[in-house]
Amino acid sequence: MKVHNRPGAGPTVLALHGMSSTAAVWGDLERRLAGRHLVAPHLPGRGPSRDVAALDGLDGLADVVLELADRSLWAAAGETVVVGHSMGAFLAPIAVRRMVDAGFRVRGVVLLDGGPRPAPSALTHPLVVRALFTGIALTQFWKLSFRAGDDAVDCLSRPTRLGLLNDLDMPVHLITAASGARPSSPEFLSDQAVSEGLAELGRMTTERVDTTHEGLLTHPAVAAAVRRIG
C-alpha cells in the first residue's frame, strides 16, 4: 500500500480518505497543520494502491491500516489522532478499535460526514449501492477498483460501527456538511442520522458547517478539531 508520510511533531495525524479519492485530498489539512506528522495512506483499490489486495469491505481496509501501524515507528512511539472523511469516517471506528486492542495509543477521532449510518432509503439498499459504485468503478477504472461496491455497501447499507468506540476513553468529534455533493444538494448525513449516531455513541460531539461533502476537506473546522484533541 502506498502511503504519504509527512515528517513532523506528534501526535501523528492518521488521515483516511473517502470512497473514490486518495491521500491527495489531505493537502489542505497538511498545510493547516504545518509541522505536524501526517500519515495518509492511499487505501487499497484507490489511486496508487488500486491493485493492492485486501479483503472486501471495511474490515479488509481496517486490516491494512493495522498492518501499517504494526510496521511503523510512529504508531508505537507516540499517540495518534485519526481523521476520516466519508468512507474513511466509516472505517475509522473499526481501525481505531483494532489499533487500541493491539496496544497503540489513539488520542482521539475526527469524523467528517461519516460514521453514523445515513437515513435508510431506496438509494441505500445494498443492491442499489453495489450497482451504483460498480458503475462508478467502471467509469473511473484507472483509479478505482471494483472493491468499491462492497466498501460502499458496508458504509451506506449496514449498521454503524460507532459502538466499537463506546468503552474507549477518547474524544470523538463529528463534523457534518450542510450540503451534499453540491451547495443545492441535501446533506449527506441528516439530523436524524446524527441523532441515531449519538444513540450509539452518546459522548460524541458534533457540529454542522456550511459547506459541501467534499468542501469539508478544506474547511478550517477540521484542523481546529485536530488541534483541540492534541
Image (cartoon, rainbow, N blue to C red):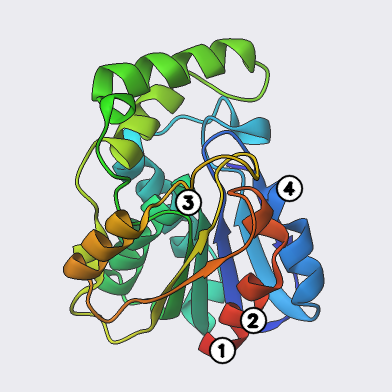
* Amino acid type, label 2: Ala
Q: Is residue 115 left or right of residue 11?
A: left
The residue labelled by disc 4 is 24
Residue at screen point 53% across, 21% down? 145
Q: Nearer the viewer, residue 9 or 224?
A: 224
Q: How many angstroms separate mark 1 from mark 4 (CA)?
A: 24 Å
> Residue 230, position in %: x, y?
56, 89
The residue labelled by disc 2 is 224
Q: How many angstroms separate mark 4 from mark 3 (CA)?
A: 14 Å
Question: Circle 4 sits in a helix, a strand or a loop, which is it?
Answer: helix
Whichever of callouts 2 and 3 sits on the residue coming sooner in the sequence is: 3
Q: How many angstroms separate mark 2 from mark 4 (CA)?
A: 20 Å
Whichever of callouts 2 and 4 sits on the residue coming sooner in the sequence is: 4
Whichever of callouts 1 and 4 sits on the residue coming sooner in the sequence is: 4
The residue labelled by disc 1 is 228
Q: Residues within 10 Å of mark 4 (few under 14, many from 20)?
A: some
Residue 22 lies in quadrant: top right
In the rendered image of this protein, does residue 121 appear above or below residue 222?
above
Question: Circle 3 sits in a helix, a strand or a loop, which is it?
Answer: helix
The residue labelled by disc 3 is 88
Q: Is residue 130 visible?
A: yes
Q: How many angstroms separate mark 3 from mark 1 (CA)?
A: 20 Å
